Amino acid sequence: MPVIAKKFKAAHPALNTFRFSHRGAKDYAGLLQHYRMTFNMPQPIVVRLTGFSPRSVAKWSEGILPSPKQEKALVEMDRLLDALARVMKPAQVGQWLKSPNQAFDGSTPLQIVERGEIDRLWHMLFDLESGQPG
């Protein structure tokens, strides 16, 4: 484990247990690899979904632990990916996130997230899962 990660982990005891073990990952680098493979999401999509810099995401991929604020963004992204995987094939998620969508007035779901309107995605997912007309 890199020295920086050890120091950070000691400073943030809440991070001593990895939250995403349900993904089969044992660390953040493994988690990001899982996202890339399962959801067909290259790193730029992860950057856009989390709202953090490419450098931050690259550091996580190298095994450096995220800050609590960054981890919260990863948890939110994880929840969204779980929900999307319930309504479409996981391998289609990456492409869907980049595709213009009439339900969002022609914006892509990534643009919706970047504008801080993620609740629109959650409403769409609720309607799809509950069978309510949208």
Image (cartoon, rainbow, N blue to C red):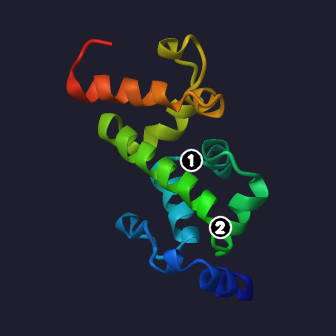
Q: Nearer the viewer, residue 91 or 131?
A: 131
- The residue under the point 32% across, 34% down is 87
Q: Please state the horizontal and vertical placement of residue 33, each as a whole percent of the image.
A: 55, 63
Q: Please state the horizontal and vertical placement of residue 36, each as a whole percent of the image.
A: 55, 54
> Counting other residues with Cα less than 10 Å from the Cα at mark 2, is it few (<14), some (14-19), or many (20 or more)?
some
The N terminus is located in which quarter? bottom right
Q: Nearer the viewer, residue 58 or 94?
A: 58
**Which corner quadrant of the image does residue 55 belong to?**
bottom right
**Which corner quadrant of the image does residue 105 belong to?**
top right
Left or right of residue 7, residue 108 in this image: left
Q: What amino acid type should be assigned to the residue bearing mark 2? A: Ser
Q: CA separation, marks 1 and 2?
A: 14 Å
Disc 1 marks which residue?
41
The C terminus is located in which quarter? top left
Label 1 element class? loop
Label number found at residue 8: none
Q: What amino acid type should be assigned to the residue bearing mark 1? A: Met
Q: Please state the horizontal and vertical placement of residue 4, each as a whole percent of the image.
A: 73, 83
Looking at the image, the residue that sits furthest to the left is 131
User: Closer to us: mark 1 or mark 2?
Assistant: 2
- The residue under the point 72% across, 89% down is 3
When the figure is inspected, residue 123 is found, relative to residue 8, above or below; the finding is above
When the figure is inspected, residue 106 is found, relative to residue 113, above or below; the finding is above
- The residue under the point 69% across, 59% down is 57
When the figure is inspected, residue 78 is found, relative to residue 2, above or below; the finding is above
Mark 1 vs 2, N-terminal side: 1
> Counting other residues with Cα less than 10 Å from the Cα at mark 1, is it few (<14), some (14-19), or many (20 or more)?
many
Left or right of residue 32, residue 7 in this image: right
Q: Please state the horizontal and vertical placement of residue 116, each as a whole percent of the image.
A: 61, 31
Label 2 element class? helix
Q: Contact (CB < 8 A) between labels 1 and 2?
A: no
Disc 2 marks which residue?
61
